[in-house]
Image (cartoon, coloured by chain):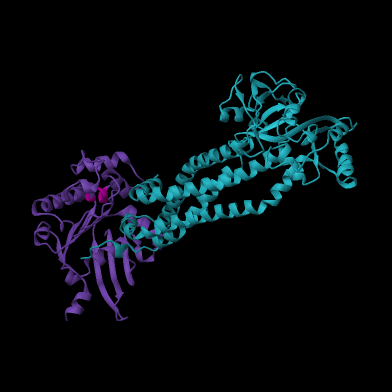
Amino acid sequence: MTLALIILRSLRQHLLSTVITALSIALAGGLLMSVWVVKVQSQATFTQVNTGFDAVLGARGSKLQLVLNAIFHLEASPGNLAAADYEFIKHHPAVKLAIPIAVGDNLRGYRIVGTVPELFSAVEYAPGKKFTLGSGQLFNPVAKEAVLGSFAAQKLGLHAGDTFHPFHGLIYDERNQHAETYLVTGVLAPSNTPADKVIWVPLHGLQTMAGHDPRAATDVSAVLIQLRSPAAGFMLDMMYNKQGNRLTFAYPIGAIMAELFNKIGWFDQVLTLIAYLVALVSAGGVLVAIYNSMAARRRDIAILRALGAHRRTIFGAIVLEAAAIGFLGMLAGFAAYAGILTAVAAIIRAQTGVLLNAWAYNPVMLWAPLGMIGLCALGGLLPAWKAYRTDIAENLAPVS
Amino acid sequence: MSLLTISSLQKSFRTPEGGRKIIVDVAEFSLAPGQQLALRGESGSGKTTFLHLIAGILAADSGSIRLGGRDMAALGESARDRLRAETIGYIFQTFNLLQGYSCLENVMLGMAFGGGSNRAHATAMLERVGLSQRLRHYPRQLSTGQQQRVAVARALANRPALVLADEPTGNLDHRNAREALALIRETCRENGAALLLVSHDPEVLGAFEDVRDFAVLNRALQEAGS
């Protein structure tokens, strides 16, 4: 009770420095938790997102590029496959389902992807979840119609019944507008997958868009594949990647994405290191703030000692005050964390369509606050030692 | 039987030249329970050091200070702290109130390290010194006379056996000084506490029946004067 009173009064007496130091702790703690959660969540999310497919078949090239292009709708397509290749894999006994996609156009930066209606009727993008329409109806596979992902519809301001002209290429250039007019027939309900930021049109429509090479009118950009068994994946991997040299079979998708995270692992480490350093500097701030106020505190310490307070009581009060600053800082740190993660999640969603589960529990939410409070308490040791050594008589002036 | 018995007490400090200067050298001194004694002494005569030694704030070089039957010199620092908290109330010339704490909290802290805080008793002490309307005020919001009354309440809150008062009226005007002194003596009497007061003020000393000259008591001054 007495110790709590001493700590509270001291925090209040040095309110400005308490608030500034706690804010720096909040930023450091918020940053540390955000970096950690974004790292863990993005890795977990991106290696799990496969929108219901086991593998991707595409032109010869990088598996990662193929997955990024066909599943995440990022990156350029490595090239096309002939219709015969699609027909072959579609009827292969090891393949349960094959969905072709064609890319090459955009609407103000949002990709237009040609596909077949089975993508919406036969595929579970997550266990037990199929794409559903939030409004309107699915496109007619032989008409110039489109179904928009929820995020793309929201950003483009398009609704069922609206029309648009596609633009050629994956990068928006207003000079490359196609003459065709597409009718929006529906908007998908949010799925929190990359499909949300795509404009889906009939495969045939995209293949035959004016200005596209008529010789490639039956080509597809990639084939999304569901396998009958994991063993089939290794068999097709052998067939396309090792024995063949025309096409690339990207399997398994999760492992390929994990490879991406391994490649950029150094970047995570740098971010984490920076966050640790910021945390350390903030704890140092606690040390400096309390240490610099020691001259002003000496008289109060001497009075408390004259009233009978033990040296260890004073020592404990200073260490606990430092820990209290850490505690207050980390309370605000959760607000900083919420702000940072909301912003990061919004950026990731805008770029990939994937929504991070920012509020899922992560052990960092426990160890980071405890660690910061512990670091702050450590930072309080030096001023506490100085307080411990405060001479009562010298600081109880005047002497008569 | 004495409450406080001092024998062969010596305290020296290191001089800037590296030597040692004896500040306090008291052969014998005693104080009975409930006794009120004033020590007359000029500034710089070692009065405060003498009180600090009795309070256990300073450790003596040699000699013995027996307070309530326990020898201060034989105790470790923690035990001295405890004995001070339980047995001694200290009133300072500059009051030494904690500026960040309310009057009530100041008085409660006077009890906290001894028997433990008691809000009701702390409130009663402040009422006794006429500050019932100032419980939540901070020292800076009080006049100097009122601050000294808070200091008196704090010193006596723990029902100490001995109250040490170091020039307690040195910062007060005549009227406030008279009132403060009367209050200190009355409250000590009411609480059965002995009072050892040091002052150079003839008016203060004149209020005491029992006055001793610190220059006679402290042999260090006699040697310095000879």
Q: Examine the rendering and report whether any part of residue B176 can be seen.
A: yes
- Relative to A225, residue B91 above or below: below
Return the residue nearer the eye: A387 or B110: A387
Write down the region rendered in magenta: B151-156
Q: Percent from the top left, x then y, of residue A284? A: 47, 57
Q: On screen, B46 above or below B161?
A: below
Quarter of the image where one finds residue A144? top right
Of the pair A377 and B76, the residue shown nearer to us:
A377
Residue B58 located left or right of residue B48: right
Q: Quadrant of the N terminus of chain A?
A: top left
Percent across and percent down for residue A70 are 73, 37
The picture quadrant where one finds residue B103 is top left
Residue at 63% over, 51% down: A268
Q: Which quarter of the figure has residue B167? A: bottom left
> Residue A310 placed where, x, y %?
39, 57
**Horizontal and vertical percent position of residue A305:** 34, 57
- Which color has been applied to chain B in this rendered view? purple
* Residue A398 is one of the magenta-drawn residues: no
Q: Is residue A360 at all visible to an observer of this figure?
A: no
Q: Nearer the viewer, residue A101 or A395?
A: A101
Chain A image colour: cyan
